[in-house]
Image: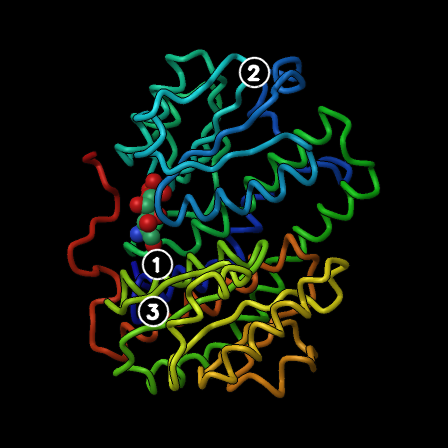
Amino acid sequence: EKGGWSSFMAKEISEEPEAVGNTILGRTHDGLVHLEELAPIGDAALKDVDRIVIIACGTAAYAGMLGKYAIEQWARIPVDVELSHEFRYRDPILSDRTLVISISQSGETMDTLMAVKYAMASGAHVLSVCNTQGATIPRESHAVVYTHAGPEVAVASTKAFVAQVTALYLIGLHLAAVRGTLDEAAHRSAVDELASVPAKISEVLEVSQAEIGQLARWMTETQSVLFLGRHVGFPVALEGALKLKELAYIHAEGFAAGELKHGPIALIEPGQVVFVIVPSPRDPSSLHPKVVSNIQEIRARGARVIAIAEKGDAAVLPFADEVIPIPLAGSLFEPLLAVVPLHIFGMELAAAKGLDVDQPRNLAKSVTVE
Ligand code: M6R
């Protein structure tokens, strides 16, 4: 039931804080992550893993990309992210030291199911992240970590995405604990950061809803929107673009900001709308000034820049037409906040165009054919 919301999607975006919170619930003990669900694979095998392959489609694959950053950073295991439908068609190299992690909200996506079956048959360990109890994909896997986002009805995936990222971060911390790659203080602080995400998402929802609604109403005639992000901002850019394509039927592209000068900057002409996901100025890497200089470059060519930036980030103000502020968070956790305005934007623009927000044309909630 929509419970007073204008669409299931609006309701599901409002449930993003709980989706994260409920996915964490019961999975930490004394401030450290422990996932009992991984017992069927076992600590000995998890210690021995030399490579992880994440398989998923669409939004779930973008969650997988974020999982790669976290797992590599914390557990120091190389991670590849592959689209399920590409995976088994090139004889992938798998062994009993490979951990395959599938991600699927529905647990019924045929492309992902076939990839899971392939991985099982090849002798890899297979762990699935799924939002639907008892679905086919978890039944076909060695182990499952359920996301507790609650049922997702709208075709566009929103609360499942943040729950998937949360589950992957928990898996990353569990692996780090098993393998001894992260000191306890860093593990505890990652758990604290994750636990603080639901309240921060609520803040984003409160602060950005009205501003984004207005922005969307101004943009009903827009033909093309670009999204730029770097490091963990890159999957967020891809997710923002996918939402606009599927919901508002607008041509949209997400780019890694560093790639701009290798081609996409040629697309920038006066009036082109570009969303930029800006890393925190507190980030110890030097990515913040690099992304700010990307903003200057596209602004100089007449782009209309909408920056999603940490609140109080004064460096972006002179160059952005709009700034959507997000609360302070560690860099791995920023995507869980930055993605929220983009979910709202896709929904609001579709609604402003008079389109069916929950049931976009040509799409099904779960894609059960290959
Ligand atoms: O049920 P799944 O998570 O396996 O679905 C994967 C994709 O089909 C899904 O995320 C799709 O990209 C969404 N419509 C995006 O909003």
Q: Nearer the viewer, mark 3 or mark 1?
A: 1
Q: Nearer the viewer, residue 92 or 267?
A: 267
Q: Is mark 2 within 8 Å of ligand 1?
A: no
Residue ID at (58%, 51%): 21
Q: Are marks 3 and 2 in contact (CB under 8 Å)?
A: no
Q: Are marks 3 and 1 in contact (CB under 8 Å)?
A: no
Q: CA distance from mark 3 to mark 2?
A: 42 Å
Image quadrant in which you'd find residue 84: top left
What's the coloring here?
A: rainbow
Q: Is residue 101 left or right of residue 309?
A: left
Whole-percent x, y for residue 211 in the image: 47, 83
Q: Are marks 1 and 2 in contact (CB under 8 Å)?
A: no
Q: Which residue is mark 2?
A: 97
- Which amino acid, mark 2? Arg
Disc 1 or 2, which lies upstream in sequence? 2
Whole-percent x, y for residue 77 in the image: 64, 30
Q: Nearer the viewer, mark 3 or mark 2?
A: 2
Disc 3 or 2, which lies upstream in sequence? 2
Disc 3 or 1, which lies upstream in sequence? 1
Q: Nearer the viewer, residue 5 or 78?
A: 78
Q: CA distance from mark 3 to mark 1?
A: 12 Å
Q: Is mark 3 within 8 Å of ligand 1?
A: no
Q: Which residue is mark 3?
A: 347
Whole-percent x, y for residue 160 in the image: 43, 49
- Which amino acid, mark 3? Met
On residue 242, the disc is: 1
Residue ID at (59%, 18%): 39
On residue 24, the disc is: none
Image quadrant in which you'd find residue 253: bottom left
Q: Is residue 38 above or below residue 123?
A: below
